[in-house]
Image (cartoon, rainbow, N blue to C red):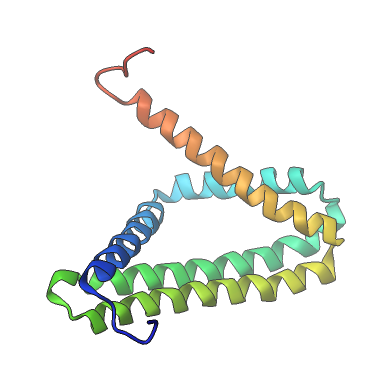
Amino acid sequence: MLSQPFHSKNCRTAFVMLMSCITFTMAIAQPVQREQKDDIDARRIGFITNEMELTPEEAQVFWPVYNKYRAEVETLKKSRATELMSAKINFDDYTDEEVNKAIENDFNSRQKELDILRRYNNEYKKLLPVKKVAKLYRAEQLFKISLLKEMRQEKAGERAVPPPKN
């Protein structure tokens, strides 16, 4: 059954999933004012440093490695988003094989991101106790949640008509 080509309905489902991921990536990857990006980066550093409970000595060796990691992942994400969006893909005009190839390319890109994370995880463990490395991953998620919540609140404050009260 797995060797059979995608059926049209399966392709549409895969397409919807792929486009949802692309849209989310593009929304996050939207160009942000340099000042805003610098502010977010400074807040990220403070938040993660605090959550990981880094000593000044640990921070001094950790942050250059982490910054290299972030740069690699950002380059990969930009490349992935650019590749998918620059093609102005209209999957309705593509064959099932072409859609399947686009999905596979996206999966390969995600695997590359995971490979980068694994490589840097090993680097972090050379620099820090494993419990602090675990705190890094939790801190990254908490920071993302905090930032998204803040962005939603800012967006809600910009609405011309206030949302209905429950």
Left or right side of 4 for 8: left
Q: Is residue 80 visible?
A: yes
Name the image quarter holding the C terminus.
top left
Work out whether residue 78 or residue 42 is closer to the camera in this orientation and state it. Answer: 78
Judge left or right: residue 131 versus residue 107.
right
The residue shown at (28%, 78%) is 6
Please provide percent x and percent y for residue 164.
32, 15
Q: Judge whether 127 appears above or below 20 on screen.
A: below
Give the residue at the far left of this rendering.
93
Question: Residue 42, how many percent across, how many down?
Answer: 61, 47
Measuring 82% from the left and 50% from the top, which residue is drawn there?
A: 54
Q: On screen, 97 above or below 118? A: below
In percent of width and height, residue 80 lies at: 39, 72
Tell which of 150 and 60 is nearer to you.
Answer: 150
- Taking the spot 29% from the left edge, 60% from the top edge, the residue there is 16
Q: Nearer the viewer, residue 19 or 76?
A: 19
The number of numbered discs placed on residues in the rendered structure image is 0
Q: Quadrant of residue 91?
A: bottom left
Q: Which residue does the image show at 32% across and 67% down from the upper left?
A: 14
Residue closest to the far bottom:
3
Residue 2, how many percent across, how many down?
A: 39, 82
Residue at the outermost front position: 1
Q: Quadrant of the N terminus?
A: bottom left
Q: Is residue 43 visible?
A: no
